[in-house]
Image (cartoon, helix red, strand yellow):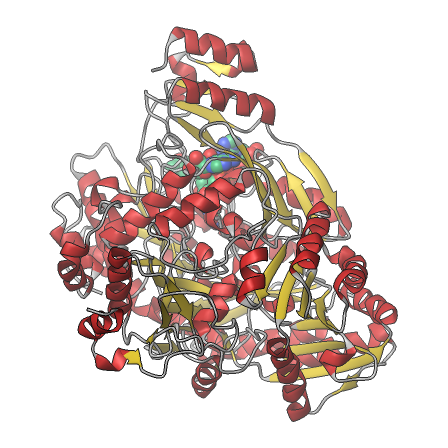
Amino acid sequence: MSLLDRVRALLGDDAVEIASGPDAVPRVAPASPDAVALLLGTARQEGWRVRLEGAGTWLPADAPADLALTTRRLDRIPAVEPQDLSATAEAGIGCDLLRQQLADHGTWLALDPPGLAGRTLGSVVATATAGPLRHGFGPVRDHVLGVTFVTGDGRLVQSGGRVVKNVAGYDLTKLEAGGFGAFGVIVLVHLRLRALPRADQTLVLEGTREDLTQVAEDVAAAGLQPAALELMSPALARRDGWALAVRLAGSAALVAAEEAGLRGASGGRFTALRAEEAHGFWMRAAESFATRPITFRTGGLPDSSDELLDLLQHQVGDEWVSASPGVGAIRWAGDTTVDRLRRLRRTLAGLEVPLTLERAPWPIRSAVGHFGAYREGVGPLVAGLRRTFDPGEAFVVAVEGSD
Amino acid sequence: MITAGLVEALTGIVGARHVRTAPAERLTYARDGLPTHRRVPAVVVLPGSRDELAAVVRLLAAHDVPFVPRGAGTGLSGGALADGAAVLLVLTRLNRILSLDPSNRVAVVEPGVVNARLSAAAAPHGLHYAPDPSSQTACTIGGNVAENAGGPHCLKYGVTAQHVLALEVVLADGRVVELGSPSGEPWGPDMVGLFVGSEGNFGIATRIAVRLLPQPRAVRTLLAAFASLRAAGEAVSAVIASGIVPAALEMMDQSCIRAVEDSVYAAGYPRDAAAVLLVELDGHSDDAVVAETETVHGLLSAHGAASIRVAADARERERLWQGRKKAFGAMGRLSRDLVVQDAVVPRSALPEVLEAIGRIAATYQLTVSNVFHAGDGNLHPNISFDARVPGLRTRVDAASTEIMEACVAAGGTITGEHGVGLDKLRYMPLIFDAESLAAMRAVRRVWDPEERVNPGKVVPVHACREWSGLRIADRGLRIEQQARSPAQSAIDNPQSAIAPRGAR
Ligand SMILES: Cc1cc2nc3c(=O)[nH]c(=O)nc-3n(C[C@H](O)[C@H](O)[C@H](O)COP(=O)(O)OP(=O)(O)OC[C@H]3O[C@@H](n4cnc5c(N)ncnc54)[C@H](O)[C@@H]3O)c2cc1C
Ligand SMILES: Cc1cc2nc3c(=O)[nH]c(=O)nc-3n(C[C@H](O)[C@H](O)[C@H](O)COP(=O)(O)OP(=O)(O)OC[C@H]3O[C@@H](n4cnc5c(N)ncnc54)[C@H](O)[C@@H]3O)c2cc1C
């Protein structure tokens, strides 16, 4: 029996998309967590190599594999609990749809990942791609209360739960959030929500990078705690100069007080955006990242942001850059070579700054790896965890590079 | 095997003063903060430096001897206990604050640093370490990392996991690994996140880099009294759903209020109230905090608060908090023994679950006092009893089990901050199926293949599935089981200590 016949026999006709991907890898869309488990159990038995896809809008769907597993039919939202500020969603739901449903219940997931609005929730969790809101609301893992995932040999594993505090058992959720799919296919996510902010205000200041870096420092020194404090390159902000964008979200009183504080700290130089302007501003910046071939993120100490931006400018250019100086995170997009990425990762490692390759075409991804420059003793642990959750090496994931 | 030769070699590493073998000395370490579990370690070793610790661990590895790390021993799940086959490694001498960087708001500490001491050291810089377990004057940062400890102010600022940036860990075989980076961004998978909360099963944290936060400039504290637990629970839900995130939102019931008021920690709580809520709002701007306080005040009134007191000054605030933080100690006055419980429920389920706990207490004729992190739904129903009374212990265990089942049935979990340790092992099958337990065990074996660090804790090994080889053959069966509730699976597991009734 051919691979496709086997899959049809296992999961039914409608699980297989006849219009296979551009590289002719057949695409399978299981409709339930159990179907994912069944498929991967069989893949393990048959030695099939599987690549994972959400909506396929973020990572290019180009890894060599026998079949592509897409989560796009796992798109239910079994629960939204406004009273508890939690929700449970399947991993294939698009972030935009999820956002709408949550808003209907007066709730909000305080994550603004880069990429297109239709990105699946699972891809955001698996790649741990937080956006500017990380400044105020933390990295992706802080929003995930628990996950259910399927291992490379078809086991369904639950970790965490749906309550906001939980220390029962080891926290495998942390491994899945940012694991790039190497430790399992996330099928279900329990989320921590916030009440929809009563007030949500974005203010922008244009200037030189140097000037804006100083303003960002002043804002931090004034003790302000905005939802986002993002320094963006001109191309990304669609402005003539660099832009420092501040987002204030919360109760009306809080936002008013923060806005007054911001005016004080900056000499009243920021311009407030109207609601629809603000929406467009953040959305376009997020989408821009998906229009360049390569994206990576780095994490340094807050006071090293400026130095790191200089380093990036020098080594790979700084046309498409967004930095959260308050938390030391920088995201870069553009085009560059394997050699330059490797060199940059080495240089950064010398400064104790990790570089995570978020997306790139397969030849670059597989050569550079999402991760690299591990610290002492970490490599064997990561290898051990991979063997545990994917003993047959079914998942085609460029965890580490080939150098 | 622990031999005289091994003890001599341990003495060679840390010095005779820091190896304790006399029975009376070892007995000091037979319990943690939970009085119901007791194990006497074979040997107690107190290393004085990271290098001594690593040398001790390598020696124990060479002799194939299990060991248990221990901080201050304030844990409430029996996690820091070692039995006669194991060596207890007490880390309280590793108590240096190695660096404190105010501009990046990062501190690096040894594991034996006491929680409150770190905040005290950060205070001159206008900073503090946010996780504030009520035991913070005694418990260590190492113990906090191992348990992923919480505290009243974790409602707004997050639990320990959200504040740990990097770790240096000595593994079971003595190898030293570095996890995380100075900024908290991982080098690969989030190994720091995985380690935090692993209860000593993955290795010993020897250096811990944590994030510090600015001290809030404006603070308001309210005490609201309610005539019923239900009303107080509903007020909690209302505050949470309002979008205002209080710094802390704590609840105490009448039994707890009276215990506190009868003790030296009397805080002026109204003795006739069925429950009080202690709500704190903080932030950068006084205007905003005042406005939010007014909103919360209105919500509490609207949900039936009989009286609301706003702390007039820092002294009054201290006093209100003192009563809360010392409540466990005060409850100790109620009777000879105290079982401190820990569970979490969805916040909207608080009213029902609190009433269920009241019914369970009545059925078993026990005194249950509730003092807990209401804003997180993190309950601490505490049972006061005298273990010398024949048969009482059995009743306490049965009531504890029923309380756990009620919390799980409401969609909750068996521990929110105290950990599984020994005490909660029997409840793990209530919330995790055999496959998930096996996955946890497999992860533990990546760090510690021989399961020599803190053996017998967290994962009930008998309830695990086998995690090796192909099991395609039993796949059909497995999926059928998956469709049933975890509680049902626990019933099916003959070795489970629990026979739960309610399914989720
Ligand atoms: C009155 C009272 C109030 C409390 N209030 C709270 C509260 O509000 N919130 C809360 O979360 N907890 C609370 N606790 C529980 C307890 O204080 C915490 O769990 C604390 O984190 C334990 O720290 P410790 O140093 O005492 O650790 P121990 O009890 O000594 O050890 C706890 C666990 O950590 C492991 N461990 C210790 N050090 C290390 C290390 N360096 N590396 C690896 N593993 C290690 C041990 O093996 C053990 O499994 C309270 C306890 C008491 C007695
Ligand atoms: C089971 C029980 C029974 C009680 N019975 C009574 C009673 O009959 N009558 C009565 O009046 N009170 C009783 N109490 C109350 C209790 O004795 C006091 O409230 C308590 O001693 C105050 O200590 P604290 O931990 O709150 O103080 P803290 O200020 O936190 O601690 C005081 C000092 O002890 C140290 N310390 C605390 N715990 C540890 C630890 N685990 N390891 C190392 N150092 C530690 C601290 O570092 C600090 O120096 C009882 C309490 C309990 C838990």
Q: Is residue A39 above or below residue B74?
A: below
Residue appearing at x 19%, y 52% in the figure: B471
Q: Is residue B60 above or below residue A307?
A: above
Left or right of B297? Residue B22 is left
Left or right of B271? Residue A111 is right
Q: Image quadrant of residue B147?
A: top left
Residue appearing at x 35%, y 57% in the figure: A394
Left or right of B426? Residue B70 is right
Q: Position of residue B136 (x, y in %)?
A: 55, 43
Residue closer to the observer: A190 or A13: A13
Quarter occupied by the N terminus of chain A = bottom left
Residue appearing at x 33%, y 38% in the figure: B457
Residue closer to the observer: B8 or A401: A401
**Does residue B266 appear in the picture of this structure?**
no
Residue appearing at x 50%, y 60% in the figure: A178
Q: Position of residue B220 (x, y in %)?
A: 63, 66
**Does residue A56 appear in the picture of this structure?**
yes
Q: Is residue B360 above or below residue B25?
A: below
